[in-house]
């Protein structure tokens, strides 16, 4: 039957059901499908839906949905949206290149006079992220066009290319951000910055992008009314500070080699008990409940297994903080603290330990 068309297959099943030679299960499924088809016909012709490859066109349509004035600018539209791209099977690579991806994307519509401040603000946001995640080695890769590619690889607007490239270059120089200029690697619609970072083992990643678009807004007919009441086309800044969620998680796993700081660890704390005394379990559970009540990712391990085995499991899972609780700890209102890769750091009062954990997470300590 595989060589038949879908229509031919349907006709065969239909004939089998009508003549009564189809199994009961197939006949019931066919009748249900037929009834569903009749219901769908009542709704009229179905609309076509497509998988979204990027957020840009949707944001452009939002901008164009109502009249805009220079007073509305800069207009910043941000979306943590899911996009789909049919990467070839040989190009797929773990979390680094996937077909379903979540993009923390934004488009900033602005006037030429606002461009420098907006573009620099995006770069400053990147620097803030680098500090938060402990990324010390990075460079801005400034990609420009080539005259030979105008009308082919790039939009044929030489004056706008020069203007926007000069604007980006001035922002980079004025803000003293390290960058390298690479000719003939711009986007087709304007110059761009790719943020190159290096993980602790020295591997290079393209982590984020900051792009200038002077061409596509005009293609979409985007306009705003300026001070002199004339219609003008806004500049658009495409920015994705952490690239795709999947790629960034892949980078972080490699950057930290799985040894995440407490604030970032998937499992921040594990509470381990020595024995299965009911009072001891109740004391340990109260600690778990208090930590979870403060949104700490905390897991209990109250099994009656040897404590060395439980510690070894937690170490292998790279749990950042282990709270080991025995009878003496309970009697003293304390816990024994172990840190992944550092071992036992001693017993401390329960309240002090919890306060330290919460402060470390809040301050995003390394």
Image (spheres, grey):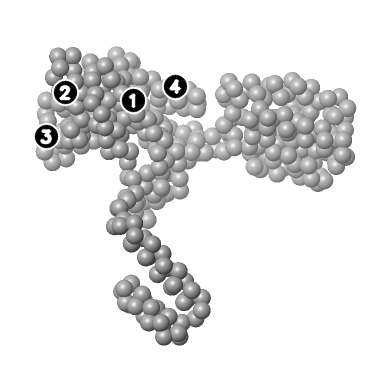
Q: Position of residue 359 (x, y in %)?
A: 64, 21
**Residue highlighted by disc 1:** 76
The N terminus lies in which quarter of the figure?
bottom left
Count the numbered circles shown: 4
CA–CA distance in space, label 4 to label 3: 36 Å
Q: Which residue is mark 2?
A: 232
Cα distance, mark 4 to mark 1? 19 Å
Say which label, 4 or 3, has the lower sequence index: 4
Circle 4/circle 1 CB separation < 8 Å: no
- Picture coordinates of residue 324 (x, y %)? 78, 34
Q: Residue at x 37, y 65 (%)?
A: 38
Tell me what residue is drawn at x 85 percent, y 35 percent. 280
Looking at the image, residue 51 lies above or below residue 192: below
For residue 46, above or below residue 272:
below
Q: Earlier in the sequence, mark 1 or mark 3?
A: 1
The alpha-carbon separation of the residues under discs 2 and 3 comes to 19 Å
Q: Is residue 72 left or right of residue 318?
A: left
Q: CA distance from mark 2 to mark 1?
A: 18 Å
Q: Is residue 71 visible?
A: yes
Mark 4, secondary structure of its residue: helix
Residue drawn at the location 66% of the way across and 43% of the way down: 316
Task: Work out whether mark 2 precedes mark 3 in sequence or the reverse, and give the earlier one.
Answer: 3
Question: Of residues 285 and 12, which is closer to you in this image?
Answer: 12
Mark 4 highlights which residue?
128
Residue corresponding to mark 3: 156
Asked if marks 4 and 3 touch (Cβ < 8 Å), the reply is no
Q: Residues within 10 Å of mark 3 (few under 14, many from 20)?
A: some
Q: Are marks 1 and 3 in contact (CB under 8 Å)?
A: no
Q: For residue 58, which quarter of the picture? A: top left
């Amino acid at each position: 039957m595989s060589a038949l068309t879908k229509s031919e297959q349907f006709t065969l099943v239909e004939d089998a059901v009508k003549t009564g030679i189809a199994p009961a299960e197939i006949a019931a499924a066919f009748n249900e499908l037929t009834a569903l088809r009749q219901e769908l016909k009542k709704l009229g012709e179905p609309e076509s839906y497509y998988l979204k490859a990027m957020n840009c066109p949707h944001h452009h349509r939002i901008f164009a949905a109502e009249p805009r004035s220079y007073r509305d600018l800069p207009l910043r539209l941000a979306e943590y949206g899911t996009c789909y791209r049919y990467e070839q099977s040989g190009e797929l690579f773990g979390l680094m290149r996937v077909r379903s991806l979540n993009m923390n994307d934004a488009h900033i519509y602005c006037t030429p006079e606002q461009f420098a401040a907006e573009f620099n603000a995006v770069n400053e946001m990147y620097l803030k992220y680098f500090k938060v995640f402990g990324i010390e080695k990075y460079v801005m890769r400034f990609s420009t066009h080539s005259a030979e590619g105008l009308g082919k690889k790039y939009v044929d607007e030489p004056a706008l290319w020069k203007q926007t490239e000069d604007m980006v270059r001035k922002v980079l120089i004025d803000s003293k951000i390290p960058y390298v200029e690479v000719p003939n690697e711009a986007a087709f619609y304007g110059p761009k910055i790719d943020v190159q970072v290096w993980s602790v083992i020295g591997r290079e990643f393209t982590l984020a992008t900051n792009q200038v678009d002077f061409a596509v807004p005009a293609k979409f007919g985007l306009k705003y009314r300026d001070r002199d009441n004339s219609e003008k086309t806004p500049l658009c800044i495409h920015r994705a500070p952490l690239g795709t969620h999947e790629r960034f998680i892949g980078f972080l796993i490699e950057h930290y080699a799985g040894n995440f700081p407490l604030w970032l660890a998937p499992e921040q704390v594990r509470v381990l008990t020595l024995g299965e005394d009911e009072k001891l379990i109740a004391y340990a559970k109260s600690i778990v409940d208090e930590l979870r009540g403060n949104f700490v990712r905390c897991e209990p391990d109250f099994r009656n297994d040897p404590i060395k085995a439980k510690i070894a499991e937690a170490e292998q899972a790279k749990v950042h903080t282990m709270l080991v609780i025995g009878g003496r700890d309970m009697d003293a209102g304390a816990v024994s603290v172990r840190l992944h890769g550092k071992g036992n750091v001693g017993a401390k009062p329960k309240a002090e330990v919890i306060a330290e954990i919460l402060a470390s997470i809040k301050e995003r300590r390394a």
